[in-house]
Image (tube, rainbow, N blue to C red):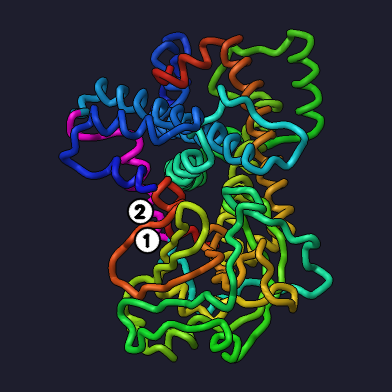
Amino acid sequence: MSSLTIHDSHSAEAPSQVIQPVWVRVVHWVNAVAMVMMIMSGWQIYNASPLFDFTFSHSITLGGWLGGALLWHFAAMWLLMVNGLVYLVLGFATGRFRKKLLPITPSGVVADARAALTGKLSHDDLTRYNQVQKLLYAGVIVVGVLVVLSGLSIWKPVQFQWLTAVFGGYDFARYVHFACMALIVAFLVVHVALALLVPRSLRAMIIGR
Amino acid sequence: MRRFRSLLIPGVDKTLLVKDATRLLPDPARRRFIAGGASLGALTLLTGCDVSDGFSAESLLAQISKFNDKVQAAIFNPNTLAPTYTEADITRPFPFNGYYAEEDAPDIDGKDWTFEVRGLVDNKKSWTLDELYKLPEVTQITRHICVEGWSAIGSWSGTPLRDFLKLVGADTRAKYCWFQCADVDGYNSPLDMATALHPQTQMTFKFDGKILPRKYGYPMKIRVPTKLGFKNPKYVVSMEVTNDYKGGYWEDQGYNSFSGS
């Protein structure tokens, strides 16, 4: 982060300033791939025994049938878990979480949400997240942890029965797992739409600046 | 029913194999799985992997599934018991489940039926139902979890498999108990020895206190509350104690072989 401080003092020559360090970009895109594989194969698994009165269209699922989807799901889970752990460890160790995502205050979130909806929110400095971004990014990290833990609890309801009990038992844990997926998909829709609205942020996540 | 494994044998003519496989896969959904694999395989061209080496998404996924077998065997604690429930928790009616309609379930005459014991055992005698009914009986109420995701709680009575293995002098250092069944197409499934020796793994003769009805696997089911439902064979006719992995009905089609809960 030292390079960041140096460049801050020469803000006139800001184009070389790193917005997203390389480790963030790598884990971000690995996570994107893993999440999409988990979600699409998860929809196919859901279709084998739907929790609600609908199923997911075959055109948007991965694996073709239950057995194929389970193979994808239990392969991509390693990518998701290992990558997620790297992200959490580096996020805490480098102080990125604290610097980028805190503090979050209710009044700040309301003010920034209002500014965003009236088109008054500034995107001049992409190194600083607004309060709505902070809330969504922190929130999706928590949901990401929950989706993995609830998934483990329905994968191993005997060996990890304490974890299954935390999520309200096997049957309820399936709903928790589904709800986490739904929140992540909702985040994804907003996240991708806003990244396309502010293309500089997408560029920063690809080439860093 | 060896379709999945046969895809993994090296040195086989791939064109013929794909032809065979497509013929074997009537379900268009399964074909899509293959198609999805092929396109991901094509992606490896871009990364410089030689596709003719047989790299495909399918073989990679199969390898990861084998790795997951080992991970699950390591996670499996022989002393961890599956949660048990009360009579009031029993799911009524308990669902019939199979890859065929209920009226196509095996209709076995208990008087003619025998349970054949083969492989690495001292006593290879076949057992009649009356002989098996005389073995000590325990009852457990546990949750049956299907690979599809649904679950149901049932009450199963019978004799612990580990006591029977001791009784017939099985080599419990062997890797598997391989069960064969009377279902159409010949259902079979391998059970790893650690799970076979788990205290709750049971040779089941009764459901809900009554002789196991036809729809739940008469005359004998292997109840394994630490495994998914398809690892709980019904209409069992023989058991082979073996060190060889002989595959299984669903395992060969791609379900993870360990499939522990």
Whether residue A14 is in magenta: the answer is no
Which x, y percent locates residue B213?
Answer: 69, 68
Numbered disc 2: what chain?
Answer: B
Residue found at the far left of this picture:
B11
Which x, y percent locates residue A21?
Answer: 42, 28
Which x, y percent locates residue B30?
Answer: 47, 33
Label 1 residue SS: helix
Q: Inspect this view and state whether residue A141 appears.
A: yes
Asked whether, in this view, residue A129 is left or right of residue A18, the answer is: right
Q: Which mark is residue B125?
A: none
Q: Tell whether label 1 touches label 2 (CB within 8 Å).
A: yes
Tally the marks.
Answer: 2
* Residue that mark 1 sits on: B70
* Residue that mark 2 sits on: B66
Query: Who is closer to the viewer here, B67 or A142?
Result: B67
Q: Image quarter for residue B47?
A: top left
Q: Quadrant of the C terminus of chain B?
A: bottom right
Label 2 residue SS: helix
Q: Kindly identify the amino acid type of the residue bearing the numbered disc 2.
A: Lys
Whether residue B64 is in magenta: the answer is yes
Residue visible at 59% across and 91% down?
Answer: B134
Q: Image quarter for residue B37?
A: top left
Q: Image quarter for residue A40?
A: top right
Q: Is residue B23 above or below residue B258?
A: above
Q: Is residue B121 above or below residue A61?
A: below
Residue visible at 39% across and 47% down?
Answer: B1
Residue visible at 39% across and 50% down?
Answer: B252
Label 1 neighbour load within 10 Å: few <14, some 14-19, many 20+:
few
Instruction: Please give the range of residues in magenta.
Output: B52-71
Query: Who is closer to the viewer here, B115 or B175?
Result: B115
Which x, y percent locates residue A167?
Answer: 70, 56
